[in-house]
Amino acid sequence: MANTIFITGATAGFGAACARRFAAAGWNLVLTGRRADRLAELAAELSPQCKVHTVALDVRDRDAVQAAVDALPAPFATIHSLINNAGLALGLQPAQACDLDQWDQMIDTNVKGLAYVTRAVLPKMIEVGEGTVVNLASVAAKWPYPGGNVYGATKAFVRQFSYNLRCDLSGTGVRVTSIEPGLAESEFSIVRFGGDAARAAKVYEGTEPLTPDDIAESIFWVVTLPKHVNINCLEIMPTCQSWSPFHIHREG
């Protein structure tokens, strides 16, 4: 019987790439996202390779998350692994000029939504007695940058939540990994800049960034390692990206 993986934010970017990678390996898929049309297209693409169940879902809705997990049909009810991919960044304004609605949306999605899904799915994984929770954090969890304020803080939560889950899940056979990508080209920047594709494209000018397929392959490796191996944290940057010198403000 094929393993089943539950993937949030599966309609684009890392989530869609993970769906394709695990489908190629014959895993059954539970795919969630807010855009039902994209979920349907992805299911049609992947269903020749594996069984696919889709749920149009906003992870910020705690009751809907629990209801979706409780209502999983029999072929998908035994969950072996979870990829908490749903998340976003909004804006690059300094904290003193931010849009509080954007802060709320990032906290509700990246923090609360991830926690809701994890809490709903964990009992099923513990029942199986093995599997991996993969939480999508970011290099912003550790390395600050101007305008990263709340986004970076939400990803720091994801990292620490992952570590604490490892403690809680000791002895259950369930592993936890925080995946922390750096510069990666997907819809991420388009969302961040409110749909301004030209501005988003400038982020990647003159670079060779990570791709969603790069991250999907890394996640597949983490999930399919021998059961006694747990990758606590995997920070991934493209070769073109590194760290800047400390910023020093000088008067005059």
Image (cartoon, rainbow, N blue to C red):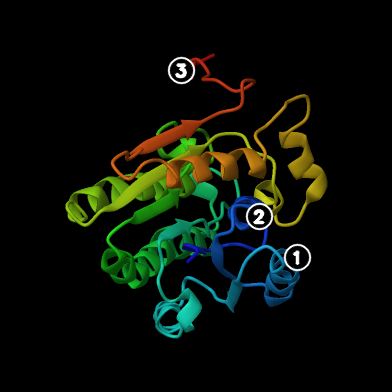
Q: Residue at x 27, y 61 (%)?
A: 129
* Circle 3 SS class: loop
Q: How many marks?
A: 3
Q: Please state which of residues 240 and 45 is positioned toward the viewer in this rendering.
A: 45
Assign a secondary structure to mark 1. helix
Mark 3 neighbour density, 10 Å: few (under 14) some (14–19) many (20 or more): few
- Whether the residues at callouts 1 and 2 have beta carbons within 8 Å, the answer is yes
Considering depth in this image, is 204 or 32 the residue closer to the camera?
32
Q: Closer to the N terminus: mark 2 or mark 3? A: 2
Q: Tag 1: residue type?
A: Glu
Outermost right residue: 198
Q: Using the image, determine if residue 61 lies above or below residue 198.
A: below
Instruction: Indicate the quadrant where residue 66 lies.
Output: bottom left
Of the 4 image quadrants, the one containing the C terminus is top right
Give the spatial CA distance, label 3 vs label 1.
47 Å
Label 1: which residue? 45
User: Which residue occupies the foreground of this view, 208 or 174?
Assistant: 174
Q: Residue at x 67, y 39 (%)?
A: 211
Disc on the earlier residue, 1 or 2: 2
Q: Which marked residue is nearer to the observer: mark 3 or mark 1?
A: 1
Q: CA distance from mark 2 to mark 3?
A: 40 Å
- Secondary structure of the residue carrying numbered label 2: helix
Q: Position of residue 195 (x, y in %)?
A: 75, 56
Residue pointed to by mark 3: 246
Label 2 sits on residue: 20
User: Which of label 2 and label 3 is nearer to you?
Assistant: 2
Quick one: label 3 or label 1, which is nearer the N terminus?
1
- Measured in 3D between alpha carbons, the distance from the residue under mark 1 to the one under mark 2, in whole angstroms, is 9 Å
Q: Amino acid at mark 2?
A: Arg
- Left or right, 110 with respect to 202, comes to left
